[in-house]
Amino acid sequence: MSYDIKIVGGNIVDGTGAPGYRGDVGISGGRVVALGAAPDDAKTVIDATGRVVCPGFVDIHTHYDAQVLWDRMVTISPWHGVTTAVVGNCGFGIAPTRPDHRRLILQTLENVEGMSLEALEAGLGSDWGFETFPEYLDAIERHGMAINLGVLLGHTPLRMYVMGEDAVERAATPEEVARMRDLVREGLEAGAVGFSTSKAVTHWGYHGKPVPSRLAEIDEIEELSSPVGEVGGMLQVNVGPGFYLKELAPIARRTGRQISWTAMLTGLFGPGGHRKQLDRTAELAEEGINIIPQVACRPLNFEFQFEAPFPFEAMPMFAELGAGTRSERMAKYADPAWRQKVRDNLIPVLHGWTDRTTIAVYEADPALEERPLAEVARERGVDPTDLAFDMALATDLKARFRTAVLNTDEEAIGEMLHDPNTVLGLSDAGAHASQLCDACFSTHLLSYWVREKGVLTIEQGVRALTSRPAEVFGITDRGTLALDVPADVVVFDPATVGAAPIKRVYDLPGGADRLQSDAVGIDAVIVNGTLLRRAGVDQVDPEGALPGRLLRRGRASEPGRLAAE
Ligand SMILES: [Zn+2]
């Protein structure tokens, strides 16, 4: 026979954590057909001498739900070796949505996930072409995409769909809960990989209101989780007040399914507090209850403007500004008494924020860009909080600051990455596009935590990027390199792999900006046997046939086939 693609002489790291070995990989018909030895000819031969050959990376925490409809290449994830992404996280998504609610749903994404409303509206147009969740799945499948997608059904659009604008005001009636439960079941049967929800205090939606899922009582969440137990799938949740291990354990017990929660970051639980959480997680795992914390391998750096300062919006005094006008907001920022109240009422994650803040964009004086806020304040003999607000006001709130909010304790991060009960996630790719870019988490893990720090071996690093996230999210046909699996493969140079510094580009629909990082050292990315990228260059026509598949219920299948199974 002859292979479509043959990768020769690489160090094969199969994603299971097993030791790498030198060998060849043969790919035909979209599958791995030879592993170790691949003696036959091939149309395309990739020399992988000195390189690692491994399964494509799985990014379980993205928000590409809308972007995939205008950007079939799902940039920038595949640049960094990601071949499978999960969307619909944190209870968000764009289906089911009635035409009347489209703008409110997009405004919710604008507020909570820092997406540009103009980009969303320009990208989706006025006729989305779907209303229900099954119609959305069909739409993205028809539309096509460069990488594989698994889709969670989000509580927030579901609640809007059933309750209308009451979804952001009140608890659901038993009839509404029953209707939502039926739709969750329908979504799972159509191919959702699970159900997602959020009680996070940082999740503020349109008109400064909490997102719909935050209004749900625990009973409602329990009810909506029950189809996952019956049909299959998993639960992804953003924890919040009154919604943590104590409430999650009975749901996991009753459904018998895995719950992955967002996110265990250092700094959330006080110094060393993560240890207690990991211990409790391990105890539950011993009882067979899998409540899996998502951990992140990068500090959570936010770039923000004070017109919508996401890191501060967990503080009620900032959240309430969302309901007012821009000039009311600016008046508060100018008021010394209000500023003092900010200093006095900082939430724990913002303690000392001025010492972890860089001036990112300041058009009034570009010489200050990339300088530490505290240092400039010292030079000028002013208070750094005053300086930040003065800079914001001097630029009509356009000045940008970058603050490391969480996940800065490297020792603790190393411990969490090693813990057998965690999963690596939280890239938030597609969201917070103008504020942060962690879509490059995969190349960062391999460069920083594997090569530079030596905290993970290459095999452990690859497993954290492949089979582990796949198993937690019930993605059954991805995550390992083995004979006859779909050929999602990455070839990278362990000596150079990494994420380039973040840059700002203006390539979203309507010219909106986002942050991007180029990948370094990624030689080849193969999706379902198609060479998608080589040496950092796309190898497919973005307007033509694309190799990504919709992973209905966690695996690729022909549309409509599941119904017959
Ligand atoms: Zn998210």
Image (spheres, rainbow, N blue to C red):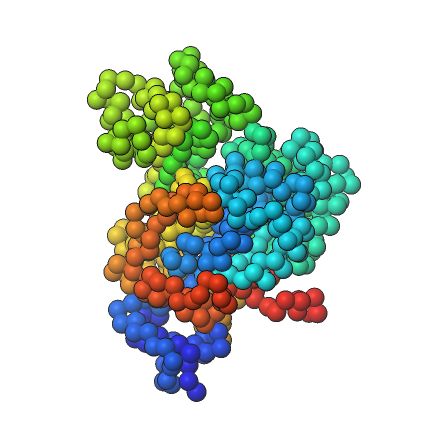
Residue at 31% x, 70% y: name it: 11
Q: Residue at x 67, y 67 (%)?
A: 560
Position of 397 with respect to 287 (left or right) is left
| 94 or 156, nearer to the observer | 94
Quarter-of-image position of residue 331: top left
Left or right of 191? Residue 358 is left
Q: Residue at x 57, y 41 (%)?
A: 106
Residue 321: x %, y % from top left: 51, 23
Quadrant in the picture for the C terminus: bottom right
Name the image quarter holding the N terminus.
Answer: bottom left
Q: Is residue 82 above or below residue 510?
A: below
Vertical side of 447 occupied by 122: above or below: above
Q: Nearer the viewer, residue 448 or 508?
A: 508
In percent of width and height, residue 66 lies at 54, 49
- In the rendered image, the vertical position of residue 524 relative to residue 264, given as above or below: below
Residue with the most extreme left position = 379
Asked if residue 352 is positioned above or below residue 334 in the image, the reply reads below
- Note whether residue 240 is visible: no
Residue in front for this viewpoint, 468 or 320: 320
Please indicate, yes or no, whether residue 315 appears anywhere in the rendered image. Answer: yes
* Count of number-bearing discs: 0
Q: Residue at 38% x, 57% y: name it.
A: 80
Residue 163: percent from left, percent from top: 71, 38
The x, y position of residue 294, in whole percent, is 47, 47
